[in-house]
Image: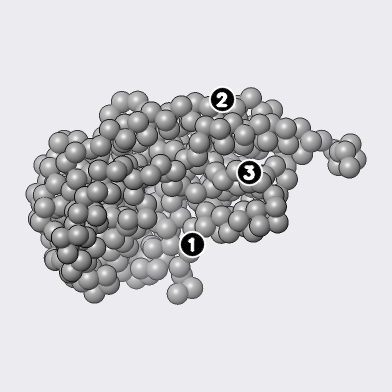
Amino acid sequence: MSRLGTETAFEVLAKARALEATGRDVVHLEIGEPDFDTPPSIVAAAVAALERGETHYTPSAGVVELREAIARNVTERRGVAVDPSQVIVAPGAKPIMFYALLALLEDGDEAIYPDPGFPIYASMIDFAGARGIPWPLRERNAFDLDPDELRSLVTPRTKVVILNSPHNPTGAVLSPATIRAIADVARERDLWVLSDEIYADILYEGEHRSILREAEMPERSILLDGFSKTFAMTGWRLGFGVFPAPLVQPVTKLVTNSVSCTATFTQRAGVVALETRPPEVEAMVREFRARRDTIVAGLNAVPGITCTMPRGAFYAFPNITGLGLGRSAEVADRFLYEAGVAVLAGTSFGRAGEGYLRLSYANSLANIRSAVARIAEWAPAARAPSGSRAG
């Protein structure tokens, strides 16, 4: 159990709530959760399923109707031919990550993951008994991955490469050239790819491109996706994976042994979400775009802070080294306790996140403007020599 990590977002949330309990006002930019309600048509589908009595076990891999809807959706929106038999439904996308890495990794294996990146990647690699190899994303490359660096990281022990695009925490999107080059390495070195595409529908320019579209990649790739971000369904716990045929039966056994199945009425709601794609989805993305533009412009106006423009997801990843205030974790604490803005240190996502903070703009425009104003007011005093500060 000591090999398991955690998500710092929940720890910062707890600190922010404790601060609020003392009477302080805090703007929450720490949690990566859409602040929108689930579209009413999706809620209605779940209620109808409950009223029909759909509260019993289902097949471990999911109800046929949802697996068929997922296969159609992936085929149409990603341009990848998927059979429903390849789809496994789970209570959230995290279990797909858990199952895939448990199925593929053994003691002594190596898995390469993005750094900074979602912290559960490294946690689950360690838990599976393998060795995690961080693959740095650098601001000078617009946080795109470097395929040549991937080649240098691969060893005879490497079995899995994890991708995430659009990316948490930077908001970067892998370029088509990068995806093609990564596919070349995977084929050459006989690697599995776990492609985390949970933010695929929260994209501000161009179209999402999955590595599964590359030649021979469907046979060696696992697509991880879910309903939490696109449909504002975080609390519903509904995710899925698309697996190569040889992995379907073993991973389904993992589902049976761990959670039995996913709630039936939740799955019925998922069918409606995919087949009707409520208009609230596109409205949510438009609102995220407006928030992105507001927070990036506001951060770049603060002396000592620079922020690249995210192309997807709903996170800003500003460089705060110009503030000269020390390590990211210390600056994140000062944002909370002195400015009243809850954010995450870049190092919550790996060592390469030092010098950065992650701000989730899954909050209202009014709150984002308030947060930026607080930061702009706080930063000059924070940077001033201690002897010149008021009070």
Residue drawn at x 35%, y 31% as measured from the top left:
283
Question: Residue 6 — which label?
Answer: 1
Residue at label 3? 341
Seen in the image, is 335 located left or right of residue 117? right
SS for callout 3: strand
Residue drawn at x 28%, y 49% as measured from the top left:
43
Give the Cα distance between marks 2 and 3: 17 Å
Coordinates of residue 256 in the picture (x, y in percent): 20, 71
Type of amino acid under label 1: Thr
Q: Is residue 160 visible?
A: no
Coordinates of residue 138 in the picture (x, y in percent): 49, 38
Mark toward the start of the polypeptide (2 vs 3) = 2
Mark toward the start of the polypeptide (1 vs 2) = 1
Coordinates of residue 23 in the picture (x, y in percent): 70, 52
Mark toward the start of the polypeptide (3 vs 1) = 1
* Quarter of the image with the N terminus in it: bottom left
Type of amino acid under label 2: Ala
* Quarter of the image with the C terminus in it: top right
Q: Quadrant of residue 101?
A: bottom left
Type of amino acid under label 3: Val
Few, some or many C-alpha atoms within 10 Å of disc 3 (few <14, some 14-19, many ≥20)? many
Look at the numbered discs 1 and 2 and tell me whether their residues touch, using CB distance below 8 Å. Answer: no
Q: Quadrant of residue 357?
A: top right
Give the Cα distance between marks 1 and 2: 31 Å
Q: Nearer the viewer, residue 219 or 240?
A: 240
